[in-house]
Amino acid sequence: AVTPLGVGAVTSFERWVAGKSGIEDGEGRCDEFEVTDFLSVKEARRADRFTQLSIAAAQEALSQAGFEDGLTIDPERVGCIIGTGVGGIGTIEDGYDVLRDKGEGSVSPQVVPMMMSNASAGSLALRYGLKGPSHSVGSACAAGADAIGEAARLIRLGEVDAVVTGGAEAGLTALARAAFENMGATSSSGISRPFDARRDGFVMGEGAGVLVLEDAEKAAERGQPELGEVLGFGATSDAHHITAPQPEGAGASRAIERALEQAGIGPDDLDYVNAHGTSTPLNDRAETMAIEKALGEAAKRLPVSSTKSVIGHLLGAAGAVEAIVTLLALREGVAPPTVGWEEREEGMDLDYVPEARPFEAKSGDGAIAISNGFGFGGHNAVVCLRAG
């Protein structure tokens, strides 16, 4: 993973647990990311930043999966599904500047393959020889979680043996900033404080998170240790409003219930909830209600924290990055904090974890959590994970 907290999943996780924030001047930028550590100068010029970030994240994931020297399994049985919210928006804006200032003849033909939302998935498939199903998922802020859910589905159906999956986003551009600000979605204070009574909007961020999902039996056959398991996935649509969540969190609640049902577990089996937790007034209240409705009395006993408190909102990459750090939380037995949560809002009574604290897994088979991802358009996606 590449996040505003650093390059590498463990680095990002450890800094989050320590209460460090990657947000500066009201944005979550990946300042430690050096593109030339992963791509040649020529390659970098031909890839939008969201694709560059995804390549760095994929390199980490593939290496950890035992593929640092290339695939050792049938490439036709390996897919690639990457979520993104705004794709190559930086390339689009730069291309328009050239069009406006220098005319049509000066616009690079590279704008097309760089700006398209499937540029990341296509580039990863090309770079690593992934010849199975490959596509992008564009369900806004639920895209990363949706990509993981779709990847798990393909494996369960037996269509593939493995999928390189996740999400990538590089939307810190002038147009995106202005649009989100003018719709009242972003924080005027520049502070991300999910679930806090003083929250006033999300803080924009960038980054990428990529996992290698593989059929458990296939991984065991090649002696690859299992880091965790996707137990279940649930997806629903609010059918309520293009940007606002259903006020009582009905659609989100159903997605949680579906994820648990597919996992074959109940609310009492959960050890942790990684919330979508955007720091907007509407989302955080609706999500609290959704968690309470889906999990019942168990909701009050569970630690619920938001990664966005320290990295901001990574849009289409959020669900993937958050699933990765959720898995690390399960493996380490620690609930990371919702940094900045101090003031409780009336009616929002969950345990929002102001400081990191350890927990003991309820099951001897490994700790279990859900990671929530909700997006504009009314998209709800919930991944249920178990530590390996």
Image (cartoon, rainbow, N blue to C red):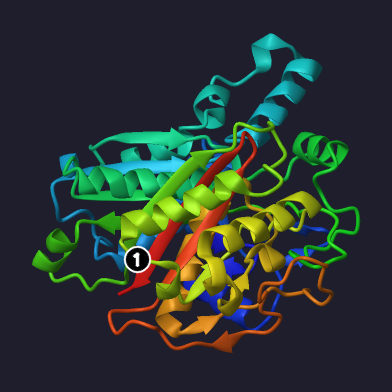
* Residue at 78% over, 63% down: 192
Residue 378 left/right relative to 42: right
Q: Residue at x 81, y 48 (%)?
A: 186
Residue at 79% across / 17% down in the picture? Answer: 100
What is the residue that sits farthest to the front in this orientation?
297
Q: Which residue is mark 1?
A: 265
Q: Does residue 256 sit above or below 80 in this rendering?
A: below
Residue type highlighted by circle 1: Ile
Establish if 194 lies above or below 58.
below
Quadrant into which the C terminus falls: bottom left
Image coords of residue 371 (percent x, y):
50, 61
Residue 220 visible in the displayed image: yes
Tag 1 secondary structure: loop
**Dot 1, crowdedness within 10 Å: few (<14), some or many (≥20)?**
some
Task: Tell whether 209 sits left or right of 202.
Answer: left
Task: Give residue 124's position: percent from left, percent from top.
Answer: 38, 43
Viewer-proximal residue among 11 and 201: 201
What residue is drawn where x is 39% and y is 78%?
A: 367
Q: How many numbered markers are drawn? A: 1
Tell me if 81 is positioned left or right of 168 in this view: left
Viewer-closest of 248 and 82: 248
In this rendering, the answer to whether 181 lies above or below 239 is: below
Give the camera-side residue of 300 and 111.
Answer: 300
> Is residue 123 positioned above or below 5 on the image?
above
